[in-house]
Image (cartoon, helix red, strand yellow):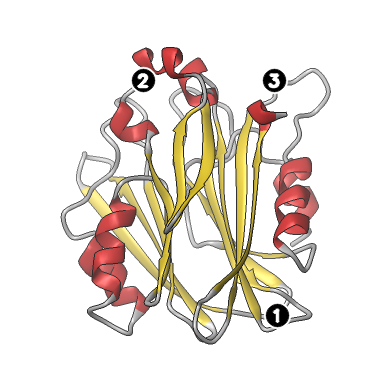
Amino acid sequence: MNTKDYLKSLEYPGRFIFAGQIKSAEEIFLVYGITGRSAASQARRIIKKESGLWVEPSTPELFVSGNPDLLIYPAMLYSAHGVVVSNGKHTEDIMREMANTQDPVQALIRGLRDWKYEPDSPIYTPRISLVFKGGFRIAASIIKRGELGGVIKEYFDLPLIPGKGWWFMTYSGLNLDPLPAFQGEPVSLEVEGIAAEQIAGWIYETLAPATGKQDLRVSVACVCASSDGAEVKEIKIINRQDG
């Protein structure tokens, strides 16, 4: 699939994860990105802390109209046991399970056992997660609301292929009300760039709105890690409100 055309077709992906293997090096890239429609959703940024990347308010006064539990969370945590990426506070529960298993899928299953989709009726935003523990595979998960209100949990064991990554997101990419959830498996896309700065910048620029459309981009962050021990090598964060 043509990556640029695919990303350009996404008017509103919501929050997204993109992870894979850099073509010219034995390094893995992990991307977390945010788009937002409301003032509260736009008033966010990603910041680096000691053990990961966190989403926090960029304009605190606008957060009075939003749910802090859904707007402030660790988007990416890393340790000697690997890297976890997600769109909510469940990142911490998954990270706690990383020390208990070598299987990335099991880390997701155990870490997400008490979680369901977000309580933001009528959208019921899915919870998306990814785990990398070293080697040449990653694990992904999507938790969403079923047709009758039940919880559907999907897990994916995905191979890493040089020059390609796996993309999945909270919404379908259509800017509708209510927002339709992402469907199907993570999408295999080619990656452009060999460093965190290049990859983050390429995604951010490719998601720029079409002429006359609102700019819904908020933040894009990319981490590059070694393929063997998941050691973080490089981090690049782009926050639109930081200019």
Which of the labelled discs sits on residue 31, or is there none? none
First in residue order: circle 1 vs circle 3: 1
Mark 2: few, some, or many residues within 10 Å (few <14, many ≥20)?
A: few
Residue at the spot of label 1: 162
From mark 3 to mark 2, how far is it between C-alphas? 20 Å
Q: Amino acid at mark 1?
A: Pro
Picture coordinates of residue 113 (x, y %)? 18, 60
- State the residue lying farthest toward the front: 50
Q: In screen coordinates, is 156 left or right of 47?
A: left
> Residue 140 is drawn in which quadrant?
bottom left
Percent from the top left, x then y, of residue 225?
58, 72
Instruction: Say which amino acid is labelled 2.
Output: Gly
* Residue at position x 27%, y 77% in the image: 99
Disc number placed over residue 214 in the picture, else none = 3
Residue 66, which numbered label? 2
Location of residue 198 by image quarter: bottom right
Query: What distance separates the C-alpha of mark 1 from that of mark 3?
Result: 34 Å
Q: What residue is at 37 percent from the left and 13 percent from the top?
A: 65
- In the picture, the quarter occupied by the N terminus is bottom right
Q: Are marks 2 and 1 in contact (CB under 8 Å)?
A: no
